[in-house]
Image (cartoon, rainbow, N blue to C red):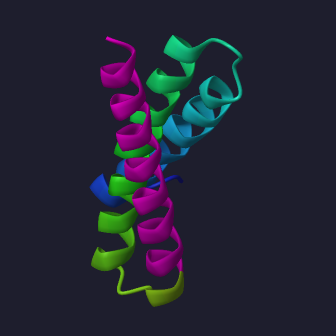
Amino acid sequence: MLEVTVLGCVGAIATILSIVGGTLVASTNDNVQVKGYYLWFVSNLMWVGYFIYNRDVWPFILYALYFTITVLALRKRMFKKIKEL
């Protein structure tokens, strides 16, 4: 029987957000891409917490890097929007 745990739910939600976020980032529409980056932001943060809790170093490093890249991409987009005003 499948045992449902909080940690398992976090992993499932992070997986779904990662997939949906990646799909949205692949869009040609800028607004849709930004929404995808925000979903990635949340999912990568969830993965970082997940791997910290599990003390799993290498996936933690990978998702911490993904999280950083997502923050930099969102920051770049925000500055681009400010310059357009």
Q: In x, y percent, where is residue 12?
A: 48, 46
Query: Going 34% across and 33% down the picture, which residue do you hit?
Result: 79
> Does 12 sit left or right of 9 as displayed?
right
Q: In x, y percent, where is residue 4?
A: 39, 51
| Residue 48 seen from this side | yes
Query: Going 61% across and 24% down the picture, which residue do you hit?
Result: 24
- Which quadrant of the view contains residue 22? top right
Q: Nearer the viewer, residue 26 or 15?
A: 26
> Does 22 sit left or right of 34 as displayed?
right
Is residue 24 located in the magenta-colored stretch of the structure?
no
Residues in magenta, as a range: 59-85
| Residue 8 seen from this side | no
- Which quadrant of the view contains residue 27? top right
Q: Nearer the viewer, residue 42 or 80?
A: 80
Q: In x, y percent, where is residue 48?
A: 36, 66
Q: In this picture, is 53 found above or below 12?
A: below
Is residue 64 located in the magenta-colored stretch of the structure?
yes
Provide the major secondary structure of the magenta segment.
helix
Q: In x, y percent, where is residue 8?
A: 41, 55
Q: In this picture, is 38 found above or below 14?
A: above
- The image quadrant where one finds the C terminus is top left
Q: Nearer the viewer, residue 7 or 14?
A: 14
> Does 13 sit left or right of 85 as displayed?
right
